[in-house]
Image (cartoon, grey):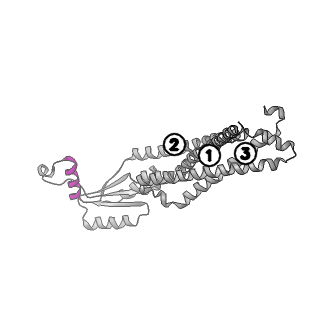
Amino acid sequence: MASSYDKFQRRRLISSYFSVVISIFLVLFLLGALGLFLIHSEKISNNFKEKIPMSVYFKDEANDSILKAFDAELASKNYLKGYVFISKEEAAANNKDIVGEDFMQFLGMNPLPNSFDLNLLGAYVESDSLAQIEADFKNNPHIAEVIYDKRLVDLANENIKRITYWTLIISGIFMVISMLLINSALRLSIYSNRFVIKTMQMVGATKAFIRKPFIKRSLLLGLIGSVLAIIGLIILLVYVNKWFPSLGILQDYGAMAIVFVGVLLFGFFITFVSTFFATQRFLNLRTDDLY
């Protein structure tokens, strides 16, 4: 009978430890994922904004020397991520592929201008910066027109700021909830040992001595949960990098180190604090209150 009871208690204890580890893992994984998003939010937003092109169209009288001079000028600009020259002939061929017919056959001429498609660095894809760059280009008498999607730029910047703002709020709320969840799981784990705690106290053991094994065990559970969370985050990073290699997330070792160390330290911190106060609560209870 005692053997069956001991087995039942052991299973219940293992189940309690398992639930604590799973709670720590899920909470730290989600917090780590939010942390990675916040760290890489600028890189993600820049990656999107750098895909918004600015097209510079030249007048028909602009000859090859003028176009080459402008090409050399662009090479010296520090706000450009890249650019490509599109000749009149290339523009006509691209238009033919889109429309499906050669418009020059019935026009008898090529009305499309020579142009440059520019991709600016994300930090310069702002309304003020773009307006200044546009004004500088228009000072060139050979440039006929500068075109970019102003509305898309405004929407991109507004949405990025809004997403970052709400992510910070959600991260703060989730951190509080996570602390409560982990604290609750650890308290339930310690609750099953409340009689052991009181018995040790009654035979003269100090509070620090009683707390020590519980804190050690909780720190071990926190370590296991943190390591599982870090493994989950690595898998997440590999998956994201597979679909968005241009972000270079796996090459950002500094950001990964910050998040992984943060996950590990937070796992230790929350388990230590929760276990300390949970054991303290049962140490301060009267024997009658244990029931």
Say which label, 2 or 1, has the lower sequence index: 1
Q: Where does label 1 land, which residue? A: 21
- In the image, residue 98 above or below residue 246: above
Q: Where does label 3 land, which residue? A: 275
Say which label, 3 or 1, has the lower sequence index: 1
Name the disc covering residue 162, or none.
2
Looking at the image, which is closer to me, 159 or 217?
217
Q: Position of residue 56 (x, y in %)?
A: 32, 56
Q: Position of residue 116 (x, y in %)?
A: 31, 58
Amino acid type assigned to the residue bearing label 2 in the image: Arg
The quadrant the C terminus occupies is: top right
* Gap in angstroms between the C-alphas marked 3 and 1: 14 Å
At horizontal 65% and vertical 53% (from top left) the residue drawn is: 265
Amino acid type assigned to the residue bearing label 1 in the image: Val
Q: Nearer the viewer, mark 3 or mark 1?
A: 1
Relative placement, left or right, of 101 versus 21 is: left
Amino acid type assigned to the residue bearing label 3 in the image: Thr
Q: Quadrant of residue 57?
A: bottom left
Range covered by the magenta-colored residues:
87-99
Residue neighbourhood size for the residue with mark 2, other residues' Cα within 10 Å, grouped as few (<14), some (14–19), many (≥20): few
At horizontal 61% and vertical 51% (from top left) the residue drawn is: 226
At horizontal 72% and vertical 51% (from top left) the residue drawn is: 216
Name the disc covering residue 136, or none.
none
- In the image, residue 90 above or below residue 37: below
Magenta stretch encompasses residue 92: yes
Q: Nearer the viewer, mark 2 or mark 1?
A: 1
Residue neighbourhood size for the residue with mark 1, other residues' Cα within 10 Å, grouped as few (<14), some (14–19), many (≥20): many
* Gap in angstroms between the C-alphas marked 2 and 3: 38 Å
